[in-house]
Structures are given as C-alpha cells and as structure tokens.
C-alpha cells in the first residue's frame, strides 16, 4: 500500500452553468511525480487550482496527509494562503508573476510564509542554481522577462515556500525545445530532492516520460490512468496525445 500524500475524491467544478470537472479522483503518493494530461479545456487547471484553494465552485474532497502517520486534513474550501502553510504550492500557467517587481523580489514573495532568513537566502541560491537564467536577471523586472523566463520564475517562486507538494501548471508552455528538455530535467531534480510533484501538461510525451503515474482527462472526467511508461505505450494515448 503506497503512502498517499494527497487524495482528491469526486471533485466537481462548476463555473456558472459550465460543469468543468465531473467527479475526478486522483491519488498522489508521497515522493512521486503524478501527471494530469489532456487537451485544451479538459479541466486540468481547474483540478489543481481547486487544490490550491483558488476555485470557489469546487466540491468533493481534498485530503492531505502531510507526514506519514499524521492525521489527514480536509482541505477543500480553505484559503490559498492556508494551502501554502500546509506545504502545497502552485506554479501557475503563463505569466502570473508580478510584473513590476524584480526577479529577486518575486522569489522573496514566494517565501512570504517563512521567517528563516538564512533558509530563504539558501533556497533563493538553490533556485538560481536550477535556473541560471534567473540568476543573471535577478535585478530585472518580472514583466520584462521572456515568456519562458517568466515560466521559470513562476516555478522558482513556488519552490520558495518549501513545499512538500508542488503543483506545476504547464511549465513547458511556450518554451523552446531545448528549454523544454531542461525544465523536465529540473522537475526530476525537484522530485529527487524529496518534493512530491503534481504536473499538469499538454506535452504528453515529456510528462509521461518522467511521471510515476498518469491520469488522462477528457471533458472533465478521467478516462484512463496508469503508470507513466504504460500510458506511453497505450495505443489510445498514442493516437490521441502522442501524434500516433
Ligand atoms: P488548458 O490546457 O487550455 O489550460 P485545462 O484542461 O487546464 O485547459 P481548464 O482551464 O480547467 O482546462 O478549463 C476547463 C473548462 O472550464 C473550460 O471550458 C474553461 O473555459 C472553463 N473555465 C475555466 N475557468 C473558468 C472561469 N473562471 N469561468 C468560467 N469558465 C471557466
């Protein structure tokens, strides 16, 4: 029996009359990389944004067991800042960094829930090691970074809260092929350092290649699931998501 860190049970998301997520259940074992893949509008962002406390119209259950042996916590309905305090961080899709603040200020903001100055400085150095491009641009305003650099900053900022679980919303979006390879390498390193990863991606090949387990979402429902490597070999997945 794997040690389950996060369980999403029967999650529904309604936006007015739109039923965007229709009873999704996912298990995220501690220390794993789990990916959620699917086409545009399948509901992937809605699932992780619900876990981050950002979706008002979400119902179902989100159960977190922060450390093995701890009592499980029921999270759905809590505020985004509570989720960060519970050790869950979201790196949002696209350019959701603060454009008027510098790279260093954006990263510092990611550590808002911490008071250990030395630890924050160490983690900022660690982010700069992972993303040397950000180190070169620490003084630059976030809004003047390229799309790919902003994506890196969003991932780096999520790491600054020292999360146990990091949720990444399409981290490869808009990146050139070489940078796509880099970002998946970095996700592996983040995981190897002990963080559990929930990865939302449209780049199905890359995501399935690094994922321990994968869920395929279509129009708000999970239609297939299994170990990443099995999904890569699955004829239905090949046809629909891997270009045959
Ligand atoms: P993409 O890969 O294009 O980002 P996704 O799989 O992440 O898509 P979601 O962003 O979760 O999908 O969207 C699922 C559905 O819910 C879409 O039809 C979208 O238009 C709708 N939706 C998402 N957010 C809202 C919102 N705030 N208000 C109304 N509808 C929304």
Image (tube, rainbow, N blue to C red):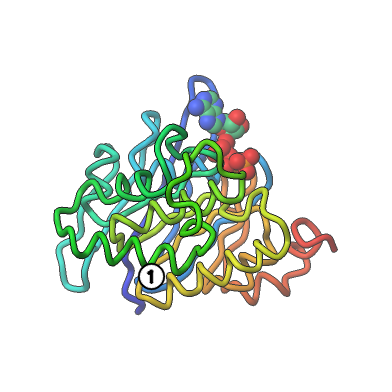
- Residue shown at the point (61%, 65%) measured from the top left: 207
Name the side, left or right, on which 195 lies relative to 93: left
Queried on whether the Cβ of the residue with tag 1 lies below 8 angstroms from ligand 1, the answer reads no
Q: In this view, does 111 lie above or below 2?
A: above
User: Can residue 105 be seen from the camera position used here?
Assistant: yes
Q: As displayed, is residue 167 above or below residue 14? A: below
Question: Residue at image x 39%, y 51%?
Answer: 157
Q: Name the residue under label 1.
A: 29
User: Residue at left 48%, top 54%?
Assistant: 168
Q: Can you give x and y, in whole percent of width and height, for residue 163 in the image?
A: 31, 60
Q: How crowded is mark 1: few (under 14 residues within 10 Å), some or many (20 or more)?
A: many
Q: Can residue 42 be seen in this view?
A: no
- Left or right: where 91 falls relative to 207: left
User: Which element type, helix, strand or loop, lies under badge 1?
Assistant: strand
* Closest to the observer, 164 or 20: 164
Quarter where residue 127 is shown: bottom left
Query: Residue 219: x percent and y percent?
Result: 63, 41
* Coordinates of residue 226 in the picture (x, y in percent): 57, 70
Q: Residue at x 61, y 68 (%)?
A: 182
| Quadrant where the N terminus is found in the figure | bottom left
Left or right? Give the position of 7 relative to 184: left
Q: In which quarter of the image is residue 160?
A: bottom left
- Which one is nearer the viewer's eye here, 92 or 118? 118
Residue 89 location (% of width, % of height): 35, 52
Question: Which quarter of the frame holds ligand 1?
Answer: top right
């Amino acid at each position: 029996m794997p040690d389950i860190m996060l369980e999403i049970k029967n999650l529904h998301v309604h936006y007015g009359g739109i039923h965007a997520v229709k009873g999704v259940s996912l298990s995220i074992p501690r220390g794993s990389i789990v990916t959620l893949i699917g086409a545009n509008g399948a509901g992937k962002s809605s699932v992780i944004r619900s876990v981050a406390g950002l979706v008002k119209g979400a119902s179902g259950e989100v159960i977190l067991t922060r450390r093995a042996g701890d009592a499980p916590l029921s999270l759905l309905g809590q505020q985004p800042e509570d989720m960060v305090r519970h050790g869950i961080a979201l790196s949002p899709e696209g350019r959701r960094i603060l454009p008027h603040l510098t790279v260093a200020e954006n990263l510092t903001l990611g550590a808002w829930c911490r008071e250990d100055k030395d630890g924050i400085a160490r983690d900022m150095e660690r982010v700069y090691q992972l993303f040397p491009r950000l180190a070169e641009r620490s003084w630059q305003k976030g809004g003047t970074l390229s799309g790919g650099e902003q994506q890196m900053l969003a991932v780096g900022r999520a790491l600054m809260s020292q999360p146990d679980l990091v949720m990444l919303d399409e981290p490869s979006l808009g990146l050139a092929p070489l940078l796509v390879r880099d970002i998946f390498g970095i996700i592996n390193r983040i995981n190897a350092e002990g963080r559990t990863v929930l990865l939302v991606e449209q780049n199905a090949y890359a995501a399935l290649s690094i994922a321990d387990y994968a869920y395929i979402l279509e129009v708000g429902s999970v239609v297939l699931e299994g170990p990443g490597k099995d999904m890569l070999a699955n004829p239905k997945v090949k046809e629909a998501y891997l270009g045959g």
